[in-house]
Image (spheres, helix red, strand yellow):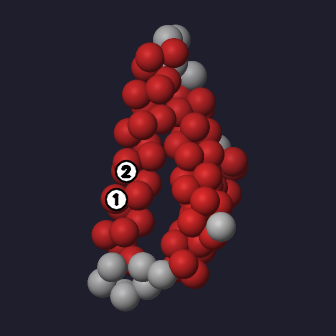
Amino acid sequence: MVGVLLIGAAVATALLAAASLRTPSLVTALLAAYLAFVANLGLVTCVLSPLRAVTRGGLAVAAALLLATALAV
């Protein structure tokens, strides 16, 4: 259940980031959302890995921070 919430938060963050770009076409918006999603997962893992914090808790904190940032933008 926690995994579904974490993936949902990453998807919501990617969609909000893509929406903030205000692109003229749907294809461009979907591509931006995909790139934001992949970048989110990759960068969070790269940042948390040296700290040995790639756990449910570490990922939840990162997802919450990124989602709050995307909402603020």
In the displayed image of the protein, which residue is found farthest to the front?
Answer: 1
Q: Can residue 64 be seen?
A: no
Q: Position of residue 46 (x, y in %)?
A: 31, 69
Q: What element carries label 1?
A: helix
Q: Quadrant of residue 28?
A: top left
Q: Which residue is drawn at 63% across and 70% down?
A: 2
Q: In which quarter of the image is residue 47?
A: bottom left
Query: Label 1, on which residue?
Result: 42
Nearer-the-camera pick, 3 or 62: 3
Separation of residues labelled 2 and 1 (CA atoms): 5 Å
Q: Would you call the spot at circle 2 few (<14 residues within 10 Å), some (14-19), or many (20 or more)?
A: few
Q: Quadrant of residue 27?
A: top left
| Residue type at the position of mark 1 | Gly
The numbered dot on residue 39 is: 2
Q: Residue at x 43, y 43 (%)?
A: 36
Q: Where is residue 11 in the image (x, y as percent from the top left)?
A: 56, 46
Q: What element carries label 2?
A: helix
In the displayed image of the protein, which residue is found farthest to the top?
Answer: 24
Is there a contact, CB below 8 Å, between mark 2 and mark 1? yes
Identify whether 11 is placed above or below 26: below
Q: Residue at x 37, y 48 (%)?
A: 38
